[in-house]
Amino acid sequence: SNSYVSGGTVTIAGGRIAGVGGLVGINRSGTISNSHTSNLILDATSTSSVGVPSPYATDVGGLVGDNIFGGAITNSYVNGGTVTVSGSGSLDNIGGLVGYNSASTISDSYVTGNTVTVSGTATIAGRYVGGMLGYNGVGGIVTNTYASNGTVNGTTYVGGLAGYNRSTISGSYATVSVNGGDFVGGLVGYGNA
């Protein structure tokens, strides 16, 4: 609770990247409240090398990479900054606030003035990209959230608020620029609850 990161850069590069956040990488059953990042640059790059034939970068968020197993994020935000994921292989579940949310809650939280960009060399790069949340999985509850004054750039399943939704999003909105190829929405790229 009551934690923040102001300015600075988080850079990670490697063959297989998972669970990267500006404040917390993986929130498993924990509670994050009244916390934020401001003007943070988060940059993740997946690279192919000998011994890593299938590189990837997944679950990357401006505040939290993974919110899972009963995790709770409340009254928290990301203000400004960038979340950029690039490289080879699959690049999935990328969000301005949270990359991946499953069986967990996000409430009374927002992202403003942030740019989320995913670009890669593989045809499966840039899936599940959102201004606030990349992928809202089964049991994920999102309430009273928003993304504003930002830009979201992805390829498939790209949304102003969430790239892909398999559960519940309520009382939320997005006023951001959204750019993508298939399954692109101002609020949610694709809903399959």
Image (spheres, rainbow, N blue to C red):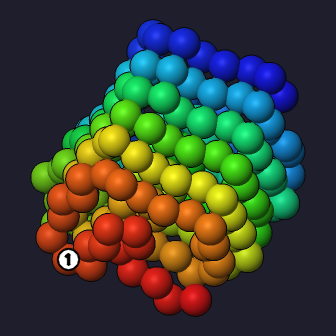
Q: Is residue 181 left or right of residue 50?
A: left
Q: Secondary structure at mark 1?
A: strand
Hey, what amino acid is under mark 1? Asp
Q: Using the image, determine if residue 5 lies above or below residue 75.
A: above
Image x and y of residue 90, in percent = 32, 59
Q: Is residue 57 left or right of residue 102?
A: left
Residue 172, picture quadrant: bottom right
Image x and y of residue 41, in percent = 38, 22
Residue 124, picture quadrant: bottom left
Q: Is residue 16 left or right of residue 171?
A: left
Q: Using the image, determine if residue 190 lies above or below residue 145.
A: below
Q: Is residue 129 visible?
A: no
Q: Residue at x 63, y 28 (%)?
A: 36
How many tags in the picture?
1
Q: Residue at x 79, y 38 (%)?
A: 32
The front one of 63 and 33 is: 33
Q: Is residue 37 left or right of residue 177?
A: right
Residue highlighted by disc 1: 182
Q: Is residue 37 visible?
A: yes
Image x and y of residue 104, in percent = 76, 62
**Quadrant occupied by the N terminus:** top right
